[in-house]
Image: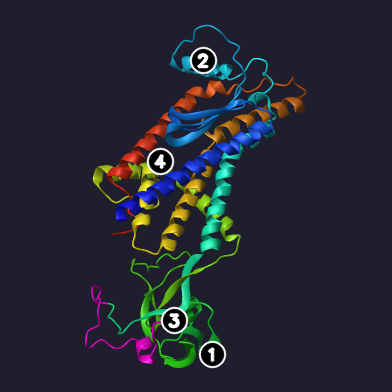
Amino acid sequence: MEILLYLGGILFMLVGLGVSIGLHEVGHLVPAKLFGVRVGQYMIGFGPRLWSKRIGETEYGFKVLPVGGFISMSGMYPPSTKTGPAKGVFATLVQDARTANDETIAEGEEERVFYRLPVWKRVIVMLGGPVMNLVLAVLLFTLMASGIGIQQASTTVASVSECMIPATAAQQQTCAADDPAAPAAEAGFEPGDRLVSMDGEPVATFAAASQIIQDSPGRTLEVLVERKGEDVTLQLTPVAAQRQQTDAQGRPVTDKGGKPVTHSVGYAGITAQLEYAHQPIWTGAQMTWQQVGGVTNLIIQLPQKLWNVGESLITGSQRDPNGPLSVVGVGRIAGEVAATNAPVLDRLAVLLNLLAALNVALFVFNLIPLLPLDGGHIVVALWEGIKRLWAKVTGRPEPAPVDATRLVPVTVVVAVLLIAMGALLIIADIIRPMNLLGG
């Protein structure tokens, strides 16, 4: 059964990735067709063709390797004007790119080409794919946060500590005969009690109750709880306990000697039940924005992160949990999540969160301003727009369209680097997988 669940998690992520890629390409396809560009192909995957069907002028299909997709638009670049044999490897690459581009321009439909579109329309076509992933991420995060909800501590008591285990007894899991009773146990708290008020103040969240307890070491608090439908009043006297001090970002505070700074807080010995709380509808957009910032920061640090991945492969050290993953790594984590011994709703929430994060990664990564990524095509269109605007301002003739085939050598270098990065991450995710679930 565990194997089936594991495979089910992988299948969930593969289908989700396929849908994400398919919608990304739809984001390019729809505006391209609306603007009159001839689209010859819409393909999911790369390599040999598995299946395809022509509808109108466009061939729709799937290819063997489901790691991406593309649409083939007529005349991505201006047609070539130079003839004759190319000299050198890069010159040959440029000429081959121009020849392939010329072949997409159908006879009699020279006006239905991408490069003739106004700059703003070209930007919309190229932005359509990443924006589709962004919208999908918002929908997935919203489904998770507002539909399922986010787990948070409720005001219902989950467990009550029987005793005060000394802080020096790090390995001790059970109470010894001479360990003093925990304040909550001494006060008569029971699992299932729902906190109503504390020290005369209504408590709507467990965090509010915890704050009152922490602020009241040695002081007796009158606590009203609901137990099996009846109100019960308890007398709770929190004891003083030492807790490490943290800053506004949650980082441990240390003194000049590097030792942790602690402070005294009240301790009772109760834990809260976790429950799903439905969040406001805008929470999904907020989570997406936070994820965009995190992925952007990861890409900025990508060279260092990849170096760390390679280092972990060689030395056998643990992978950085905030480092990059390949499709294999994402699938592996999805399988582990699906196979965990947890409520189905918990596992579904994690899988949705993972798929949403993957779509944010697709959005940010595709906006990197380098060909062959969408961001590279956007930069080319914007550069042409700047040249035209400058010519208009200075009274010069309108410049010729930008010939992006000249950048093919750069495109090849970027593609090789992307393939190398993918290979490194796949090998690392097989040999030295990232451990996010512990165990």
- Residue at screen point 56% across, 52% down: 138
The residue lying toward the viewer, choosing from 128 and 246, is: 128
Coordinates of residue 148 in the picture (x, y in percent):
51, 63
Question: Residue 176 colored magenta?
Answer: yes
Q: Is residue 326 in view from this perspective?
A: no
| Disc 4 to disc 2: CB gap under 8 Å | no
Question: Residue 258 colored magenta?
Answer: no
Residue underneath mark 1: 200
Tell me the CA gap for discs 3 and 2: 72 Å
Q: Is residue 157 in view from this perspective?
A: yes
Q: Earlier in the sequence, mark 3 or mark 4?
A: 3
Range shown magenta: 168-192
Dot label at residue 303: 4
Q: Nearer the viewer, mark 3 or mark 1?
A: 1
Tell me the CA gap for discs 3 and 1: 16 Å
Q: Amino acid at mark 3?
A: Gln
Residue underneath mark 2: 95
Q: Earlier in the sequence, mark 2 or mark 1?
A: 2
Q: Earlier in the sequence, mark 4 or mark 2?
A: 2
- Residue at screen point 39% across, 86% down: 190
The residue lying toward the viewer, choosing from 23 and 56, is: 56
Coordinates of residue 424 in the picture (x, y in percent):
34, 38
